[in-house]
Image: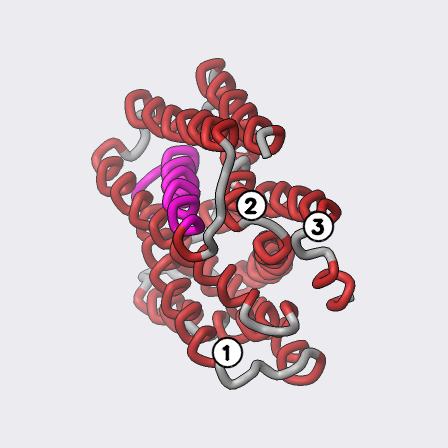
């Protein structure tokens, strides 16, 4: 399978597969974000998810894929540090703001910076129509964030700090998207990067979550977090694996923009499952976001 995937790099078939993978990642990432923001404390949920996917990845990393080449160890260490920063910023944002408020800002800031980084790091180029599509998509995302800022009634006292933390989280999203795309291209076997990334990445947040759990006056039962952690771990494999494969097969910036259609999925999930209000104006902005993604694709 590895040889087949590598053979698709830079081809039209590779582009089509990257498109599908980016959209799959968008849908799954919205579910992943809702899991972290949902029933339990975001810090605890993130810790449960990370320990789950770290344990799941261990046998693949240790026994099934080739071990990382010597030059990959510092790359994996850098990925670990960037992702820890991302998770800490995201958890702080989620504890201060509603999911449908925080998520659009995170996802809108990330691709904007990733597009610019991909121009420099990977020497990518985009057509005028693709830039227009990116602008349309981002205008929809930031329009959604502005609408939420004006009309959101819950957590008004912490809304501004939540939005600032969401923007910081978006910077980390751009950093890990660009850096991880470099990492998965730096190894001969992309599955080596993915397996070892999940194995190593699963070691950080569980410790932070456990210390937070111990300090809680009424901590939830660990069993209650187990199911959410396993579900989140499986979704993380599919979501992160999909977007990383997309960045190896095709342009990093294009995959990053298409993934941000997750904002549309997130709004629907927040409305149906988290009982957050989604009115006609939000629906119109979601149409703008989806239209921007379509323009990016047809403009290549």
In this rendering, the label closer to the viewer, 1 or 3: 3
SS at mark 2?
helix
Q: In which quarter of the image is the C terminus?
A: top right
What is the CA distance from the residue labelled 2 to the residue labelled 3?
Answer: 15 Å
Q: Which label belongs to residue 11?
A: 3
Q: Which residue is drawn at 72% across and 56% down?
A: 8
Q: Residue at x 42, y 29 (%)?
A: 135
Mark 2 or 3 closer to N-term?
Answer: 3
Mark 1 or 3 closer to N-term?
Answer: 3
Q: Which label belongs to residue 140?
A: none
In this rendering, the label closer to the viewer, 2 or 3: 3
Give the residue number, with chain letter if any, for mark 1.
72
Q: Total label count? A: 3
Q: Does the magenta segment cover residue 49? A: no
Q: Residue 177: tell me if it is visible.
A: no
Q: Does the magenta segment cover residue 95? A: yes
Could you say where residue 143 lies in the image, as x and y percent from the top left?
37, 24
In the rendered view, does 265 fall on the left or right side of 147?
right
Q: Work out whether residue 155 or residue 293 is closer to the camera in this orientation and state it.
A: 293
In the rendered view, does 244 fall on the left or right side of 157?
right
Give the residue number, with chain letter if any, for mark 2.
255
Residue neighbourhood size for the residue with mark 1, other residues' Cα within 10 Å, grouped as few (<14), some (14–19), many (≥20): some
Could you say where residue 23 lies in the image, as x and y percent from the top left?
63, 41
């Amino acid at each position: 399978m590895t040889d087949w995937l590598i053979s698709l790099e830079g081809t039209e078939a590779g582009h089509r597969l990257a498109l599908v993978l980016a959209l799959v990642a968008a849908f799954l990432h919205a579910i992943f974000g809702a899991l972290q923001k949902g029933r339990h404390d975001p810090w605890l949920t993130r810790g449960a998810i990370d320990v789950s996917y770290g344990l799941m990845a261990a046998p693949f990393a240790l026994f099934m894929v080739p071990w990382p080449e010597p030059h990959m160890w510092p790359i994996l260490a850098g990925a670990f540090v960037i992702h820890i920063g991302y998770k800490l910023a995201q958890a702080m944002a989620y504890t201060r703001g509603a999911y449908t408020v925080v998520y659009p800002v995170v996802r809108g800031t990330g691709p904007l910076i990733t597009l610019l980084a991909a121009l420099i790091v990977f020497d990518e180029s985009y057509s005028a129509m693709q830039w227009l599509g990116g602008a349309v998509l981002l205008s929809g995302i930031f329009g959604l964030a502005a609408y939420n800022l004006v009309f959101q009634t819950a957590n008004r006292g912490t809304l501004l700090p939540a939005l600032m933390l969401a923007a910081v989280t978006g910077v980390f999203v751009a950093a890990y998207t660009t850096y991880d795309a470099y990492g998965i291209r730096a190894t001969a076997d992309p599955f080596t990067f993915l397996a070892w990334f999940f194995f190593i990445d699963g070691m950080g947040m569980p410790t932070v979550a456990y210390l937070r759990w111990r300090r809680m006056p009424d901590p939830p039962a660990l069993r209650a977090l187990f199911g959410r952690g396993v579900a989140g771990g499986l979704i993380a494999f599919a979501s992160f694996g999909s977007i990383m494969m997309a960045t190896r097969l095709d342009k990093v910036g294009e995959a990053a923009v298409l993934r941000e259609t997750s904002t549309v999925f997130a709004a629907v999930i927040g409305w149906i499952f988290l009982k957050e209000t989604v009115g006609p104006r939000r629906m119109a902005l979601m149409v703008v976001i989806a239209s921007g993604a379509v323009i990016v694709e047809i403009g290549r």
